[in-house]
Image: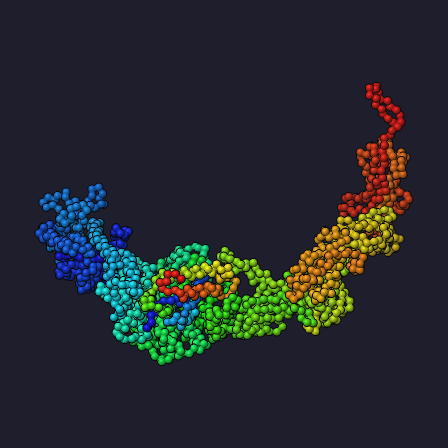
Amino acid sequence: MESRSPSIACIGIIGRHNNPLHISLLPVTGQDGQPNQERNRLEYTFMLNSSLDIFEARMPSKTVGHDFGLLHALDEPIALYGWLTNTGVKLIIVVDMGGRTAQTAEAGKTAILGLRTSDLTPAFQALQTAYIRLLRNPFYVPDDHDPRTTKLRGSLEITSSRFIKEVERIGRTWYPGITAI
Amino acid sequence: MEASSSSSKVTVEYHDPSAVFPLVSRSIAERLPLRNLNWQSPSRPLRQIRQLHVEFVPDKAAKTELRPPTQRLDSSGPTSLDIVRGGRDDRTVTKERRHQIPGLKTSPYLKIYVLRCDDKDKYKESSRNAIRDWIKENARTEGKRGEEHDAFEWMILHVVIPDTIAAGEPRWRESAKEPDELKERKTSNIKIPGKSKGTVFDRLRADFNESSKSGQDRVSQIRLQKSDVPRDLLPTPAVATTLEETPQERELAWKDLMDKFKVMLLVPFDTRVRKYEADIAEQEARRSLPGWNFNTFFIHKEGLAKALESIGLVEDALAIYDELLFGLETAVRDLASGQADGTATSFAVCTDDIEARILDTKVEGANGTHDDHASRTYSRLLEKDYRAKIVRSDISVFDFFSYMFSRQQALILRLANTHAARAEMGASSLKEGGEDLVLMSEVCWRASAFIHNNSRTLRQDLLARYESLGQTIAPASLEALVSSWMYAVADHILRETSGPALAAAQLDGQSQQANGNPHKARRSEFDFATGANPYPQRHSSIMAGKRLTSESKRPTSVSATLGRESIGSPPPATRESVDVVAGVPGLPELANYRGELFIMQRRVLEQLAEKRGWRAGWADVKAADAREREAVVDIDLDDEADSEQTNGHVATTERRLASGEKSKTSSDQRPSDAVLSTTLTTLLDSEDSFRSAYERLSEQAMRYYALATQTKSVEALVGDLAMLKRQQGDLVSAEALFKHLCAGYETVGEGGVGRILSEREVRVMAFYADVLRKLGGDLRLGEEVRVLMKCLGVVAGWRMDRKQDVSENFESRSFGGFLDDVGVLGVRISSAAERSTKLKDSLTFKAGHYFGEVALNCEIIHPESRDGFVLRVRFRSVFEEEFQLDQVSLRLQGSKDAKVEMLVGNKRPATVSPGIVEVELESEVTTVGPFLAERITFHAGNLRFIHDFARLETSFAEVNGDSDSTTTRPSAQPRSPPHVFVFPSERAFDCQVSLAKEILLDRPRHLLLALSSGQNDIKKMTIRLRPTSAGLRLHLGKATHDGIAQIETADQKSAGQIQLSTLAQDTVTMVKIPYTVEQATPFISMRLDVRYQTAQGSFTFLDTVTRRHELPLDVDVRDVVQLSTLHSSFTLTTTHRLPIVLARSMLRESKVYAVEDLFGSEQDAVMVHRKSGAVLSYKITRKEMTATTLSRREAALELCLSYVSTEELLTTMMRRGFEESLLRSGYAALTRVLLPLMVDRCRELFAGSDELALAVLLNSVSMPSYEEMGWSEVVVVLPALVRKAVGTWLHSWHAENTKLPLDYTSDVARILQRSITLSVEVPTIDMAFCATMKLGTASSRAGPNTLILRLGQPVTATVEVKHTATWSAASVLGEKKSKAATSGAQAFVLDIQADAETWLLGGPRRVHFIPSEDEDENKPKVFEIVLVPLKPGRHLLPVVEIVAESTGTGDQEGGTVASATCETFYESRGRRVDVVRDVRTTVVFVPGGRGVATEPG
């Protein structure tokens, strides 16, 4: 039996008004790093949506722009971690504790122990950096992605392919114990 | 829990040789636990121990004593003592094992010698020595061990039995000064004669208290009351009289004892803590050294934790456990990552008995009831003798974590003061107050994290176990075991944390619902629903919007509706109930985490069920999705199975789902039930039982989430339940649930301005629509269509956005499958339209939500050989199927006159296929001018889609009222609606309106309508004119027309319109319509609407006409009346800046008057300016009288003026020149747009320019330039094809034509000549006088016209007055004479007005006279006067004025009487005389002379 190690299953960027800005799903990968199991988008949308409640519940006690840590351990392999930027954008990372094949036996063993909160900090920081970079893009109009101000009627999701690629890269790159992405 | 209960109390050992302790034990127990102890250690801040539970244990010696029967008697309730005595002591003995590592044994902190000494003699005899021995023994023990781990204190408790001598000894004395204050009797200075000094108590104190000042008082005394003591213990008869203690004294004695307990307990405790800390520090220091063992370290540190715990500092203990947990994680991590070289830490590979433990858990509580027994069976899951294993360093990691968790959980629960923990502490629940829900929620929170992490450890553990046994475990069995464990732990925690407060909160919610309408009571407080939040509200600008969207807009009562719908489930807690319990801190958290645990259980259940192929809720939809997708992609299943084998087991949810499903489908091999715990086995007995368990767990979780105001989670769960009901075929319940869910989406309002529905929500709605359709019925139809349309709107929105800016690749990846699924459920626009046809009323939607890029091509196209125009509307259909739009219509509104509206629509239904669609909209209207496209309406079935151009861009920020919230606003200015410039083709019908050239001022003026049929063969025509300027009246009934027949209709409706019959192609006809205005207005305007019918259909010509109504001329008349003639002079000025040219003028004579042009009538054209007018003079004489009477009008003269307006001339010349060039240029098709525009523009330009007036004067007018004409604006609206060329051509035209020659004699000018006929009334005067003043002889004539008068010389003058009645109305019109005239005595007053300084007047100044009837001109009336000139110089003669005398002021009833009119022509007016001194007499003054010599002249 191969040992598995944690990987990011899903990254959700949720806007200030709880509108999804971007949801990246990262597949379960096998031995060779090739995806062998897609994730169900709907299921993860439910997950992210429910986790917003926890953000809301913890909001007053947290100073803005903080790591919310473990939001919700859904079941054995799936756990959600949250981060709030000071503009009210929520970053949510869903970790699948057995999302990928452990590269080393040690990695497989440590994986069993779960994650430390600090494990995800680099990922959140990288996401925030990516988001800031997106905001600096003059063609990205934040108001168009805000249900209060937008004139678009469809999805308000971020469409910058660079940002999306960056998010996916972060999702793929992260592993427990990484120091910087 | 055994471990925790023994360590959460302090042990006190008592030595009770005389078995009196039971007598006081009850009183002691009443005063326990000890409260408010303050402990300070150098390394820590001051701690207050609020409660200290004390356990009294007899020492070995005491235990061997016979147990007094009173023990049972005096302990009726569960006291600490009872517990100690009852059950525990045996076990503590067996547990008592010596270890090298301290901290395991709960050695006593305090040892008490319970002394019964009835008198001093006995004390002396035996007691003292016994105590001494006891102390010695203890002191020896202390000395021998030399360890501070077991540090303790000792004390003596003297129990005084009543009726003994000791009882008679006083302890207290009264203070002299303060009677209330009790003081202990001093030992030294009391002497009682006949007795040895002191009491037993005094003796004790003297003997055993250390003498130094700092020494502890180790002696305490308790006096028993008679009632407390069994008879057999009392000495019979009473030895001494008992000194009765007052209650106050008794209390003080007890307080003294308790205080001593406190002090005595804290001292050894402090010693012990220091020792432990030292140990830990030592261990820490060794951490990096080889041979360090975490287990050893753990035992040391846990010793401290236990010490802290036992003394009641549970928080501190918990902190130590947290540190330990972290340490454990680190150790395990180090071990796992291979960095633990050199440490002696070792863990067992696996847990031997775990499988048995898991499977052993029996729960008889599937229905939610719970009792102590159940919780105890659960606790066995976590309970084990871990510490021995730790000490042996062979505990498994899983067990270690389990132990840590169970310890922490126990500690927190103790802190939280839960019911269970209290029961263990032996305290009554009534006394202790409520539970701390915050801490309970902490337990739940930790539990979910624990389950999450440790389940993996368990999995590993199990694998290792089987490996070590040399067996393999089937993945399914493994999963089953892990799942069972997870479920069981979650269940356990849920039981532990279900407190009365929570139950009360839930009950509250339910009872409120039972009351009926919960909304009524608490509606106003809905906004406070967030009050469940225990923290104060933050007011941050950033977060300001949060509440608004998420809280207030949400359905306020999640389950209020559900409850009433009665879906066969207990109604979940409502928002209102949250209000009720909002004040309880921690409740939302607790509810939330409990909800999470329920969800975790549900997931466990779901995962197990999936292996059996059972699904519920959304998971089923998910699976359906997966099936469908697989079917679509057509994956070879075998292939995948192979790859799965090579990949090995994938421990993710999905993988397991997939594999589970496959194993089921392929071999139908059920995972053996043996590996499941019994609980789960029953739950998963059948699909139905699974579903009911699922429903129960979902409802529980939902209820808790609702209590925690976790609306989103509640929503998700409601969705799950709805799906479950749908799967179960309970459509009615499903409908109710879905309806409730969708209501949340609805609250935002139509159009989705505030909120954009997510994919998830669309799916919910799609299912809702599906359920509605299945249920059927008229009522549901409307809802169904609405829901369908909302879904479609969202789907369309996504597609539109995607198409705009993202590559196909992205689209297919994110939404592809999902949108198809929605389609499967019948969410199609064609089906929505088809369903809507059955609706009674049409539903209106915003077109922008369904059709992308709705755009109007503003260029009009003229169809071949017919009037009207065609506009094209383009839009993008994002729907995948074709559907039909029954009608597309566009409303145009005149941009100048908003009341002009046109409706442009398509003739036949348009088929919409995916992609860009273009629909041609046809109009039969012929008109010129800019129009604003106002709205496009699409009709499909009973659905209406409206696209508003104008109102589309109201800022959203304004709508929401928070304009500050936006950071950037790139497109803030509202987009103006598209302009459509409509103009007719060259050969279209035309109607030109002009004012008639001839104006008769006293008659109604006329409008001329030139109707030209153009290419149309008109069969019938209706002209409608509506005045739009105030006071304008069009007399359509009196219209005249030539060459065309009018259809007379008596129809009332046809009033205000003219109906004309056929008009052949290319013919022009004129219609002349008289009009009047009620007030002088410079302009008149009207709306023209001509409907005409040809073989091709009926068409409309629309125009708004504004024409200048004001006359270009002002005429001023001055009349001078003489006896026989009347001189009239007319002054003409223009009312306009530009001059007019007066071509001809003529005063036409009437029957009464003859006219003689003084200057000659047919003169050359005269230019009339505004400031310098032309003057026309005529002499009017009376004609011979005819007998008949005439009206005034007939008598009046007519002034005919023919003129050419320069403005008109200029405009027309420009127009002609332009038109000619245009027709030559090849842009003839644009004539009908360019010409009217040019004319309009010219009018504007020429109207107000003074420069132009000057230029006209100089006869050189320069043409307005291209820019001045504003062509650039015009060119833009032209068809793109010719736009540029026309622009160039216009430029060149302007370049060629810079000067405009003004020729007033040209043909053009002649055509433009207009004429005005004014009727000029000659004034009628009753009497005309002609007065002459003639000077008499005294004057000498110096010249022909000059008279010379001498100063001071009187001159006689005669005033001759002639008169005539020729100009009187009677004479002219043959009317009856006026009243004054008929009376025959109309008197006139002749008034001579002379300047008093110049003339001295002799004779009458005023003369009344009556002119004779038949007076002859030759015989004038003569009045004589004398004039004396008083000043030399030139003077005018006095003026003679004749006025009619007003007859009788009072005798007529009318009061004032119109006196006769009269005019005086004073011939001598202006006649001058020279007044000179009479130089014939000279007065000479000689200076120095005697007198004045006078010489006669």
Give the quadrant of the N terminus of chain B: bottom left
Q: Going 49% across and 62% down the picture, which residue do you hit?
A: A145
For the C terminus of chain B, which image quadrant? top right
B1358 relative to B641, above or below: above
Residue with the most extreme left position = B125
User: In the displayed image of the protein, which residue is found farthest to the bottom?
Assistant: B667
- How far across and how far down the image is residue B1030, in percent? 69, 57
Residue B1452 appears left or right of B701: right
Give the x, y percent position of residue B788.
Answer: 50, 71
Quarter of image, res B151: bottom left
The residue closer to the viewer here, B1208 or A83, is A83
Tell me: B336 left or right of B1276.
left
Q: Is residue B1160 left or right of residue B1060?
A: right
Q: Is residue B1344 visible?
A: yes
Q: Position of residue B69 (x, y in %)?
A: 15, 61
Query: Count of labels shown?
Result: 0
Give the quadrant of residue B1303.
bottom right
Instruction: Please give the name of the residue rendered at 43% of the width and 72% of the height, measured from the top-left corner.
Output: B734
Q: Residue at x 66, y 63 (%)?
A: B1284
* In the image, residue B436 above or below residue B1097: above
Nearest the viewer among B1336 and B668 is B668
